[in-house]
Amino acid sequence: MHPSESRLNPPGRRFGPFRNRAMRLVAALGLTGALSACNTVVLKPSGDVAQQQGDLVIVATLLMLLIVIPVMLAIVVFAWRYRASNKDAAYEPDWDHSTQLELLIWAAPLLIIICLGAITWTSTHLLDPYRTIGRIDAETPVAKDAKPLNVEVVALDWKWLFIYPEQGIATVNELVVPSGRPLNFRITSANVMNSFYVPAMAGQIYAMPGMETRLHAVMNSNVESVGFSANYSGAGFTHMRFKMRSVSDADFGKWIADVKTTGTRPQPAGELSNAEAFTGDPAQPIGGTLDRAAYLQLEKPTQKVPAIRFATIDPKLYDSVVNMCVEPGKMCMSEMMAIDSRGGLGKAGIRNVEMLAYDKKGREHAVAASANPSEAVKRELAWVRALCEQMPGQVRDGTVKAPDDLRSLNGAGIPAPQSIGFGDEVPAASSAKPAHVSLNSRN
């Protein structure tokens, strides 16, 4: 037997190369079948905002392929035409420039970059998460009397808290919204930065402690989907996921009623209570009310937390979370900013320095400092409270109105970005005049 033949077909393994190629082909086809089962929710979502974002991805990809495909084809053509065995190919060692070729090489990419820049500029402002929803879908504008559903979102370690302020309920790792209705999300974080992302609804938006971000969206159909954190935040990040459902208005009303019922319903024997579900300790009762004490228990790091429902809530809880003053004895950031805007407290606020410390785990001494104050401290605390209550502070809302032209990827009627300085300017918030506060006032 010829040596090369022996290497190709060793004894007991006839048709070796053919068999190996066939196996590789079968494996490749198997991988192709696996790819066909991938979830394409990013390109085929149920929310109109996410759909416009998916369309933008497709348009940008097609524009870039206008360069990528010709370049790939040119590589094959040049490699074949100027191969070593092709003696008919022109050999021009002194050639170094072609004006026509230079124009083609640079003009085509430049035109594509201009198109991508125009589309990116328009869509960036058209799909601004702070912009209100102007349409339900491409053919259905939002009714003028439509009232959006407000949902307050808090990223915790490692779970999501959803507060429905108008309905007076809250849930953990369960988000239910009505389809065909504008949604207004106010998003913050309890400690570290996270990213709120529901691929079927809209793009991701960061959740940051001490700050609030906005997201306006809408769901076009009744679906069940998944939301998660798209920003690593520690050991329990992998399981920081929640169920998201969009339902009809009637079913949403039934769900609200069900939460009000199940959030206070006694747990059957052998079933974990709400408190045990996220603290592991039945001695720390939470019950069906999400007040500040319950929130401080819920805020503790836990993993793989099941859905939890609260039938009633503290209406000021979310604002306290944003202002980082849920804990007793802690001055809110809005209060501190109001004091700073008036020039500070001066000598009278020396003993209030402890209330300004924002060490999350080292604040216990601030509670003691204000629990049994002396007469002098009482006067100072009364001054702080009076000062803040009489001047709560005014800030720009930041919400942008929907454009006049509601067609996807078309920016007709969009006001100019505020940073440019032309177009309708948003008037600056007027500050209240300092009110006279007596240092002799009592707490």
Image: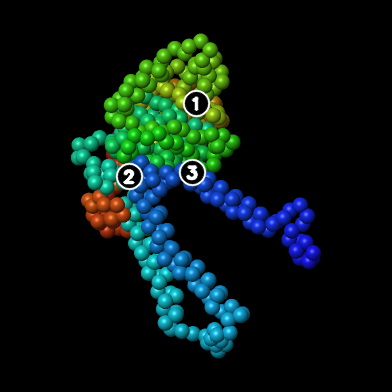
Image position of 181 with respect to 368: above or below: below
Quarter the C terminus occupies: top left
The first of marks 2 and 3 along the sequence is: 3
What is the quadrant of residue 15 in the picture?
bottom right
Report whether residue 386 is seen.
Answer: no
Give whichever of 384, 411 is nearer the camera. 411
Q: CA distance from mark 3 to mark 1?
A: 28 Å
What is the quadrant of residue 44 in the picture?
top left
Residue name at image x 35 percent, y 29 percent = 164
Label 3 secondary element: loop
Residue name at image x 54 percent, y 14 percent = 283
Residue name at image x 40 percent, y 62 percent = 63
Which residue is disc 3 drawn over? 37
Pointer 2 and pointer 3: residues touching (CB < 8 Å)?
Answer: no
Mark 3: amino acid: Ala
Identify the disc placed on residue 156: none
Q: CA distance from mark 2 to mark 3?
A: 24 Å
- Give the foreground label among 3 and 1: 3
Identify the disc placed on residue 306: 1
Q: Position of residue 23 (x, y in %)?
A: 63, 52
Report whether residue 140 is seen.
Answer: yes
Which residue is disc 2 drawn over? 48
Image position of 147 with respect to 267: above or below: below
- Give the foreground label among 2 and 3: 3
Q: CA distance from mark 1 to mark 2?
A: 29 Å
